[in-house]
Image (cartoon, rainbow, N blue to C red):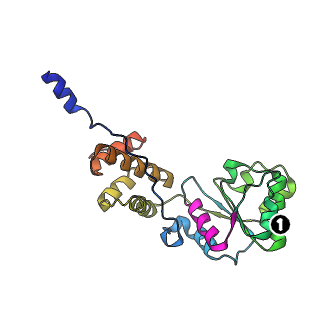
């Protein structure tokens, strides 16, 4: 019986299943964290409607802030979300108001419909913002006229996040959950994590759920456990 009690004591604290609360991330212009990798993209969004071309493409890795910027532009311009597929009437929508097409390379599109959308935007003086993980020359475009239109678009690359931006993002993600952690712990995480905003989101979400499930605070030991679990090099030194 004693051995059984000792074995139980050595186990990790039981993880209760916390309710899947939704954490509404602050996504307005005042909530945007601006660092070097985002400067060019922020400038192009802020400069609306004085764009260098009627079509702008934001290209960057997963979790780099493309959706946040698209949301800011949508609120600023009154843009309508579209998905240019055959029969979608996306070109008609683009004639009446600015339009936004997110995750282009992931959700796909109809070449002819996107071509008509761009023509509609150009002819009616509206505007089109697209987001993608890939540059447009890597999109599977077979229509020569569409490829020509895409070459004339303004492409803004969002670079990989630096240490300063990752630190700010982690603090913001915790704040969105009404959680506030020590700056030293933030630095500990940043120095050991994958350099991506997507990784920051995964780490904060896992830390929040793990701490809630165990009824503990977010500590360096807990952070090390999560970093190791997610394939990073965190240790509890």
**Crowd around label 1: few <14 · some 14–19 · many ≥20 (10 Å):** many
What's the residue at 29%, 36% (across, down)?
14
> What is the x, y in percent for residue 184?
30, 59
Residue at the image position 64 percent from the left and 77 percent from the top: 47
Q: Secondary structure at mark 1?
A: helix
Picture quadrant where residue 23 is located: bottom left
- Residue 172: x and y in percent read 42, 62
Snapshot quadrant of residue 12: top left
Judging by the rendered image, the residue that carries numbered circle 1 is 120
Taking depth in this image into account, of 4 and 131 the one nearest to the observer is: 4
- Identify which residue is drawn at 66% across, 75% down: 48
- Is residue 110 found left or right of 80 in the rendered image? right
Predominant SS of the magenta segment: helix
Q: Would you say residue 183 sits in the magenta stretch?
A: no
Q: Which residues are magenta?
A: 65-80
Looking at the picture, how far across and down is residue 170, in whole percent? 41, 58
């Amino acid at each position: 019986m004693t051995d059984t009690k000792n074995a139980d004591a050595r186990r990790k604290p039981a993880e209760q299943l916390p309710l899947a609360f939704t954490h509404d991330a602050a996504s307005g212009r005042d909530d945007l964290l601006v660092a070097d990798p985002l400067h060019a993209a922020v400038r192009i969004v802020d400069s609306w409607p004085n764009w260098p071309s009627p079509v702008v493409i934001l290209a960057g890795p997963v979790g780099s802030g493309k959706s946040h910027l698209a949301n800011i532009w949508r609120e600023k311009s009154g843009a309508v979300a579209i998905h240019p597929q055959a029969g979608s009437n996306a070109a008609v929508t683009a004639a009446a108001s600015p339009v936004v097409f997110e995750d282009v390379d992931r959700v796909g599109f109809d070449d002819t419909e996107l071509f008509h959308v761009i023509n509609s935007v150009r002819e009616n003086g509206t505007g089109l913002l697209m987001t993608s993980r890939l540059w447009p020359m890597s999109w599977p475009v077979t229509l020569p006229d569409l490829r020509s239109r895409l070459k004339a678009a303004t492409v803004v690359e969002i670079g990989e996040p630096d240490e300063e931006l990752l630190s700010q993002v982690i603090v913001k993600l915790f704040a969105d959950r009404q959680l506030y952690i020590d700056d030293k712990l933030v630095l500990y995480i940043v120095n050991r994590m994958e350099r991506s905003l997507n990784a920051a989101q995964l780490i904060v979400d896992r830390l929040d759920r793990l701490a809630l499930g165990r009824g503990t605070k977010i500590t360096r030991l807990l952070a090390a456990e999560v970093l190791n679990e997610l394939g990073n090099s965190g240790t509890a030194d």
